[in-house]
Amino acid sequence: MTASSLAVRMNGIHKSFGPVRANRGASLEVGTREIHALVGENGAGKSTLMRLLAGLYAPDAGTIEIATPSGEMRDVTGWSTADAIKAGVGMVHQHFMLVRTLTVAENVVLGREPVRGAMLDVARALRDVKALGEQYGLRVEPERLVGELSVGEAQRVEILKTLFRGARILILDEPTAVLSPLEVKELWGVLRRLRDDGATIVLITHKLDEVMDISDRITVMRHGETVARMETRDATPDVIAKAMVGREVALMGTRNEERGSAVDTATSSALVPRSSLSVDTLVVMNRGLRAVDKVSLSVAPGEILGIAGVEGNGQTELIEAIAGLRTVAEGTIRLGDRDVTNASVRARTEAGLAHIPEDRHRRGLVLDYSVADNLILGDQHKYARGARSVWALDDARIGANAQDEIRRFDIRPPESALPARSLSGGNQQKIVIAREMGGSYDVLLASQPTRGVDVGAIEFIHAQIRAAREAGKAILLVSAELSEILALADRVAVMYGGRIVATLPRREATEERLGPLMTGATDTTRPAA
Amino acid sequence: MTTTIARRRVEEALLPPLVALLVALVVGDILIILVGQSPSAVFRLMLSGTWGNWYGFGQVLYKATTLICTGLAVSVALRAGLFNIGGEGQLAAGGFAAAVMGLALPPGTPGVVAIPVCIAAALAAGGLVGAIPGVMKARFGAHEVIVTIMLNFIVLAFLNWIVASHLHVPETLHTPEMRAGTVARLMEWVSPFHGSAVNASLFIAIIAATLVGWMLFRTRAGYELRAVGLQPDAAEYGGVRVGTVWIRTFLIAGALAGLGGINYVLGYKHYYEEGFGGGAGFLGIAVALVGRNHPLGVIIAAFLFATLSQGGLAIHALVPKQMVEVLQGVVILAVAAAVPEVRRLVSGARGGVAA
């Protein structure tokens, strides 16, 4: 590639946050009119590098250059976000920055409002936003309130907002995490149109199928350094994964083998039936709406029931109600033969429930607590000196427990005194997994168990979940990743609009069949005879 | 590795208060120069009037005693993510209960019985007043800042009404002297403290701080309390009943502020008097912030503010006493800007801008 066709050049970038060295000599070259995938494990420094480019931080060392309209490279190291926006660099963040109480159009024009006199020119704002949306195939209704939008729609608003500000270099930070397969396809369409229109796109992701699908070129980061660059047409998922992790890994593409017989053996077995989970016509309200609407399901010992669906269709409320974190409006929840519909969280834990929550930063960990202290969360009453006492905690036993689980679950670095905040996403998740799966339990709620963790950790967590199934645990798995559901589940239930719209045995659950169900279409595919 | 973590923690704990103090000194210098005095002369006078002689030092210790208690009352609540602005009312309730208990006991009740009973009364009354905002928050979702502020007015007015209508000594605004339960002044043991109000309550306050530290960092109750303060959702997930912790924490916080009341009542005047708190309940907020919500930090910060307060009297000859109040304000502002807890509260209040 000649220098003249470059859009972005970052060289020798160093950036530390306290003791954490997010970027150590990272570099990046992105050409104009290309979709560039920036891949790497969690904590590899991708987002930091892009935030430096977008002017959110200044690098400790290194240079950032972008192409001027005339094709010259201009040094912009350490610029501000305002400068970046002016120069046409826009970033769509993982967490949307939208005002919920304003309309789509108002959000898009925020900061550059068209005015007539001193008044906002509402009609023009609506017109401009509509036109811009049509130009790039970004379907939005400019009059609607952002608070009413689905995540996919909100993301389109974010992209529109960036384009409205004249972005020609567009950075997207893991844009597909919250999208349904259909919405992902639409997004790809939009990105391709943008590229063909002359824009440059940097896509941060760690999903290899996406990289292969959409990108023109790839930069791989590991431990804050740039370890590989390649043309997508010369790359394979295995090569990328190896560069990301630095060793060979078994990719998730290895599908779950048919093991429909396991369920039958377990349930018909002459052994005393172990505790399992059953939910009957459950209704859970959220903000006055029936977030979970008469859901019934049961999970047998030694079985994984996967719940597929686009996020925000009641999965969170369902899991939290089962875990005791939300009030049940109607229906019952049973663990084995015990009715726990109104039981406390602790009572459910004691009845054999383990729970990997979907958001480790909000629920799963107290980030400022040490690894050791996090490894007893939920069991803290068992670590008092003297049973049931509110008094002194037994530090010796807490330490021993931490050493044991750090070793068994390979939590790195193996330092029980470190605050959980300082660990990488994958290792934070391992703390949660170790705590929930390291002790004794019968029923496991696994909600987005591998969200935002790297390929190596995904492999490890999936192995743990499979082993738990072999050990006879009943597992309810919720995942926004269809591939994860298909890799692990024995049966697949699809949730849409708070209801379970279909439950299929694994062998009938194909992406083609599940995709439409997840977006609300009725199941017209007949099962093969 | 563990030692570097420990060192970083110590740095994080000590740096903001030190910076704040430095800023206050610089601002103080400027102010003193503006009123036409020499900063070194004023600060020398301030030091000699506080730590430089037995009486002044005794007064610093006396003022610090109440501030340790009210500072703990704010910091325990903050550890659970709660803002306790009710220290003034809790302090008054504690002092009042101790005074009334001292009146009710038969004269000549031995101190080993009377003192613990009076202290228990102070703890209970402070705890009762403290628990109200806890219950209101847990049950009805009422914001504790509003409830604790308003409760100050109610409690103070209610106590003053009782004193004025039933309990006062004619021509005064205070209750009759206690018959039992007074604690010794330090001058009875260390004669140079003569005339100073410092009394054995100081040791009780330090014991309370030690117990609070042990509770916060070594017990299950403290583990759950801090988890609620850091991440309520994670605490709830960990089987902690968040509402119960709120109530329990406010009870403890109120009891600690109430304990502050014994310093004046059992140790100094031996009666309850309208307005004896003199703002120590509110100053407890500053003490907690400067002390970074750590019991040891609270003790140090209490000494700092007690020194400023007593020093204000000492430098009266050279500069207006109000200047020390300005200095206190500067310390508080500087700390507020530097302390992460405050930044988190402010950013929390600003939230609600995400989809």
Image: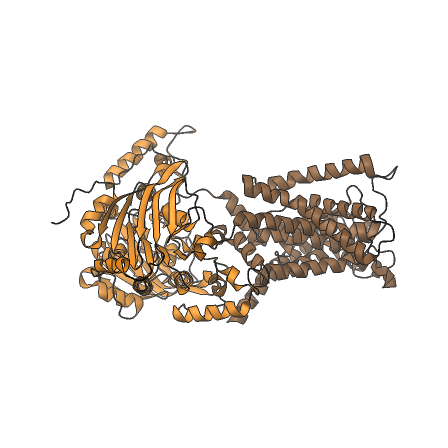
Closer to the camera in the image, A420 or B222: B222
Check the image and report above or below for A114 versus B237.
above
Closer to the camera in the image, B198 or B47: B198
Quadrant of the image occupied by residue A484 = bottom left
Q: Percent position (x, y) of residue B16?
A: 60, 58
Residue lying furthest front: A270
Q: Is B292 on the left or on the right of B267, as rendered?
A: left
Closer to the camera in the image, A118 or A137: A137
- Count the numbered circles shown: 0
**Chain in brown on the image:** B
Res. A109 in view: no
Res. B307 in view: yes
Quadrant of the image occupied by residue B338 = bottom right
Q: Is A146 on the left or on the right of B220, as rendered?
A: left
Closer to the camera in the image, A104 or B193: B193
- Which residue occupies 40% across, 56% down? A355
Residue lying furthest left: A529
Q: Percent position (x, y) of residue A242?
A: 26, 68
Q: Quadrant of the N terminus of chain A?
A: bottom left
Colour setting: by chain
Q: Is B347 on the left or on the right of A318, as rendered?
A: right
Q: Percent position (x, y) of residue A408?
A: 39, 70
**Chain in orange on the image:** A
Q: Is A83 on the left or on the right of A466, as rendered?
A: right
Q: Percent position (x, y) of residue B164?
A: 81, 36
- Which residue occupies 36% across, 49% down? A93
